[in-house]
Amino acid sequence: MNTKTLRVLEYEKIKNMLLQKVESSLGRSVAEQLTPSVNLQEVIQWQKETSEASGLLIQKGQVSMGGVHDLSYHIKRAEIGSFLYPGQLLEVADTLRAARRLKSMVKDTKEEERRYPIIEEYINTLYSFKTIEDRITECIISEEEISDNASPALKNIRRQIEAKNAGIRSRLNSIISSAQTQKYLQEAIITIRQDRYVVPVKQEHRANFQGLIHDQSSSGATLFIEPMAIVEMNNELKELKLKEKAEIERILAELTAMIGEKTEEIKGNQKILAHLDFLFAKGKLSVQMRGVEPELNEAGKIRIKNGRHPFLDAKAVVPTNIWIGEDFQTLVITGPNTGGKTVTLKTVGLLTLMAQSGFHVPADFGTKLSVFQQVFADIGDEQSIEQSLSTFSSHMTNIVEILNRVENKALILLDELGAGTDPTEGAALAIAILNHLYVLGARTIATTHYTELKQYALTTKGVKNASVEFDVETLSPTYRLLIGVPGKSNAFEISKRLGLDQYIVDRAKEYISKDEIEFEDLLTTIEKNKQTAEREKDEAIRLKLMIQEHKEEYERKLEKLAQQREKLLKEAKEEARKILKEAKEEAEQVIKDLRELSIEQEEKEKNRKIEEARKKLRDQLDHMGSGWMTNPDNVINTKPPKQLKLGDTVVILTLNQKGNVVTLPDENGDLTVQVGIMKVNVNINHLRLDKEEKEKASKVGTGKIMKAKSQSIQSSLDLRGQMLEEALLNTDKYLDDAYIAGLREITIIHGKGTGVLRDGIKQLLKGHRHVKSYRDGAYGEGGTGVTIAELK
């Protein structure tokens, strides 16, 4: 594609608009390399991709490509056996997570909503490595910190470091708090120099304080000395930190090796993610411009419906309707300056380039555009002062270059053709150039002021006149393009409206030939007839729309009546069904009542026999009771049960029988216990609680729950990789468990990321009933990647 044409039509501005929509450096690199294609099938494929992307964005609201990084450098390091740093590993995990989320989005979409086969095919070819992603997330807290849980060895080393630090500080505290030592110190503080613990000693007391000098103050008055008492401990701490560093490097190498095993798959993911980011950027731009997918052809046919130049305000611009390539292949646009001729040329050219690049175009549905092998544009004043070229020479230089390079299936846009020289010669040259381009089969749109070109368009087959409308009453253009009607310069009318004397206007007309006056009058008549026809057409359309509206209203009323009739029939059927149901239920109730009467008679007879058996048993117990209760003191419980409740299981010591408490003890301690089918009156001193009941109660008590919680609960919760809603639910449950277990301080690991997860967690903690206060993690605790909460 001609680079000069791309510059003149401001194609780079469209690419810049696209670059603002991409979310990753991968998508940016694809967008920067975009150029118009001349292959029809390729352009059709690009347009379908853009249509699917814009449709998916409208359906989902947002498709995020956040977290996608260029992993080219990371992959190379993994392939040569080096190890990646924590920040680089997090970028790998973020990119893998982005690919997995895209796959989940397609998987979770309902079958009937899947209308995007091209994008779904791209997403389905992505690889998901959740094992690698989870392992990196487990090991890496932030770009500067490795988690203690990365390996048992690392956790053990860090515990030793923590213990060693505590030991050194304890020893140093005893040194600086000693009355004998304090007189040698500049301040009673502990500090670190060259990664070793030191204390500030006054210069004059150097000989009185045994130790190794590591630094001094800028004034020289203070020496930072490592006391001899902790030199060995500092050495041991240094060894532990070297072990920690070695273990961290081993972990990083292990994670990098996992990535190295999947480099080919990750490279494939990178290409697909780059293309998807590029596609969704085009989709976003389409939604922003309210663009449509044009119908494409390679026959040179253009029909733009209500096209809008993408750089003009969509609310203020007057849409352009223009067509070429069917009945005619050359269009000559005339009319006054500032009427919109140049904007029309640029709109046609830029929309063509956009369509051939896969962009949707800002126009209405039904817009047709052709895929041209060449697009040339000579628009604007290209004269060069350095080359001493006039306006005519500059334009002619461009036209010569175009004529030397033009072939079949080309779109040519020429602004002010033949201008800048003698009108007669300029018009003749313009006609010759248009004829030459017509013979070559190019589609040409040219603007001009020459009357000769208007006449040429009226009398030549395949050439059509067009004009930009101008309102003489308001002396302003309407920016409407009228195809088939040549335009007038309106110089006399404009001058007269501006106050030029009628005498001068009449004298000016005398200098114009009669034929030219008659031609201008003909144009005036044609334009008036055209405007009248337009008004009548608009009125006809208005009446047609009114009739259509009445027709639709009548059809809606008919449909509403039909629906009401259907509703009434349905309600009548429901009422009949309800009456039948109630009648059936009433009949069943009568039958049930009859059956219950029969069962009740049988039950009365059964109860009479049971009562007889109970009375017989009671008589026997009364007869035997004198023998059992002769010495009740032998079965008196010295510690009778306290706070008996109805239903408690107790053992009657005098009968050695279990029963349930029916009534509570009175003032004398007497109560009733249900033993089997009989009730026994007994004193509370002859009872004890059942041991099995006690054990059962103890097993389900709150102490058991608290003990179980305290044994299983951890002091930290890792939320990385979770969506906000899932993380909030897990955090709320964890806070309840931690509170029951009696933890006083907990750590919530959420990572840094975009900050959405961190802000959501803090908002939950702010009003939670178990949380007393919360803060960001300090240095060594995880920084802003974690939140520390103190429980009530």
Image (tube, rainbow, N blue to C red):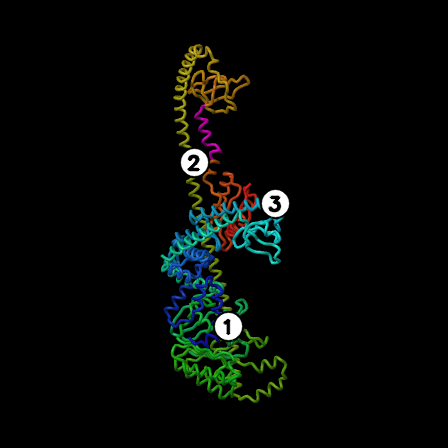
Residue 534 numbered mark, or none: 1
Q: Residues within 10 Å of mark 2 (few under 14, many from 20)?
A: few
Q: Amino acid at mark 3?
A: Gln
Q: Which mark is residue 215?
A: none
The residue carrying mark 3 is: 180
* Quarter in which the N terminus is drawn: bottom left
Q: Is residue 555 above or below residue 639?
A: below
Q: Quadrant of residue 76?
A: bottom left
Q: Which amino acid type corresponds to the residue marked 1 in the rendered image?
A: Glu
Residue at point 43% right, 75% down? 324
Where disc 2 sits, the SS reads helix
- Looking at the rendering, the stretch of residues picked out in magenta corresponds to 690-705
Q: Which residue bears the numbered disc 2? A: 582
Residue 151 rendering spot, x and y as whole percentages: 42, 48
Question: Residue 167 at x, y = what percent?
Answer: 52, 45
> Vertical placement of 98 versus 726: above or below?
below
The alpha-carbon separation of the residues under discs 1 and 2 comes to 70 Å
Tell which circle, 3 or 1, labels the residue nearer the N-terminal end.
Answer: 3
